[in-house]
Amino acid sequence: MSTVNYAQLWQLALPQVIVVAAALIALAVDLLLLRMRPTHTRFTVAALLGSLGCVLAIVRLVLAPAQVNVLDGTLLANPLTHLVQVALLVLAIATLLMATNSRFTEHIGEFVLLILVATVGSMFLASSQDLLVIFISLELLSLSLYILTAFDKHRPHSSEAALKYFLFGGMSAAFLLFGFSLLYGLSNSTSLPRIADAIHASGATGSPLNPLLLIAIVTTVIGFGFKVAAFPFHFWAPDVYQGAPAPSAGFIASASKVASFFIFFQIMAVGFAGAEGSAAWMRFTTGWVPVLAVVAALSMVLGNLVAIVQRSVRRLLAYSAIAHAGYMLLAIASHTQQSLGALLYYVITYALATLGAFGVVAIVEHRTGGDRLSDFDGLSRRAPVLSGCMFIFLLSLAGIPPLAGFFGKFYLFVSVLGSGPGLLWLVVLAIAMSAVSLYYYLQVLKRIYVANPSEEVANASADATTIGTPILSQAVVVLLAAGVVLFGCAPHLLLHWIDAAIRTTGF
């Protein structure tokens, strides 16, 4: 039995401790020193304090030991987990800085605290291969997101969305915990590698899978299907994306997806190794790969087709997220080293584009009061910089070169085909649905660059160049757009880091 090295455990958890300390400091400063100051000042100070904590945590991750394993995978530190954690911290910083223009709450310290606590939950989620720690981290992340969704007390839709999110989330957690309990019963362990060993030892290759294992596969896919908003577990996403405050929605659509997809890949590829099955066209065999293949196909079709009829940009981004979840599930279904690299590149660049898009939506809402397509009419003449950034974000999500979204899809499809011809039908479907997605993204850009603003919108936005955008919020949006362009034109800058981390870790 392994003994606990508390000094090693402390060193491993130090980045998370730094983030928690920054969250508590930001809350204390806001409550004790800034309560009577203007909202903008309070948001700026709290966001800067939280961002400083995230920067210090990034520095600690860069300087941390390369390979540490505590208690058989209960907590891990390696270049791959460090990469994911750095990405999560960067997204948290961007969310905090973009929120400085917000006016949806007076509880600013609490809002910053919850963003950072959710970040801590996602960091622990990315650094474990133990079912108990994974579940606890997921719940820490999820509970924070439920509260963040309900933070705008001035909008009834916010509370309604949070209630739906909480109810669906509680149900998915029950499915996930039930599946995890079955895995523990089958393997007598909560460690993913040991669970895989038990699956291999339970029968010869090609023999029927244990019925309890099949139930565990289905319930695990249900639980994580909710977290990543895949069909048919997506019902919460449109309401949450529309009802949550824009910074909260952007964080849910970006950082939580990075952590969830990374751990989803590990659970399926590591924990369920030996129970893959096959999803080859017309030759399905029992396992988790055909389950994911069906979910991916339905997510791509439903997400893209329903997005076409949306008149709210937030809901359009929600159904777009469902479609992108389908694309990313292809990488999990192929479960190779190359597909893991493709998944990480895709989900990180997708998170940058989606968070940036929500940043633009937040600024437009601040001036026009809505997120309808008509609220974006003529935005290019009122805010050319924001319009240019939105142009980059949406075309990247559509997969247009030379932006990061194009290379992400290209590399993802190549990695899936590289695992064998069995998933060719899914790649063909994904390419066809990508062409469909271009239509609804161009609908938004048509409103921005071609349509003329209505008199109401024009009068509300008399300042045609900035539409009242604070420098800090606009600078973050511009930096996110620059990152999308940079990683599209020079994808090796990110891919080299990802590939080196995967090789060093030996995943």
Image (cartoon, rainbow, N blue to C red):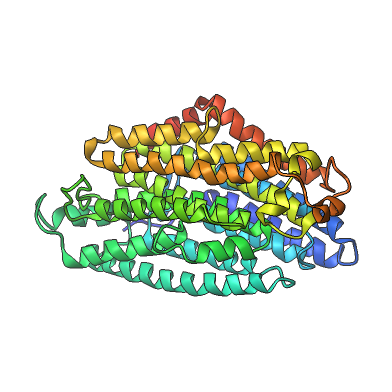
Residue 165, image x, y percentages: 53, 69
- The foreground one among 438 and 253 is 438
- The foreground one among 316 and 458 is 458
Residue in the image at 24% along x and 68% along y: 185
- The foreground one among 157 and 214 is 157
Residue in the image at 31% along x and 48% along y: 269
Residue 449, image x, y percentages: 70, 39
Residue in the image at 35% along x and 32% along y: 414
**Quadrant assignment for the N terminus:** bottom left
| Count of all numbered marks drawn on residues in the image | 0
Q: Indicate left or right for 150 with 138 as reference.
A: right
- The foreground one among 504 and 391 is 391
Residue 107 shows up from this direction = yes
Q: Indicate left or right for 89 with 101 as reference.
A: left
Q: Indicate left or right for 493 with 464 as reference.
A: left
Residue 18, image x, y percentages: 64, 52
Q: Reply above or below: 33 against 463.
A: below
**Quadrant assignment for the C terminus:** top left
Q: Reply above or below: 83 against 496.
A: below
Residue 299 picture quarter: bottom left
Residue 85 shows up from this direction = no
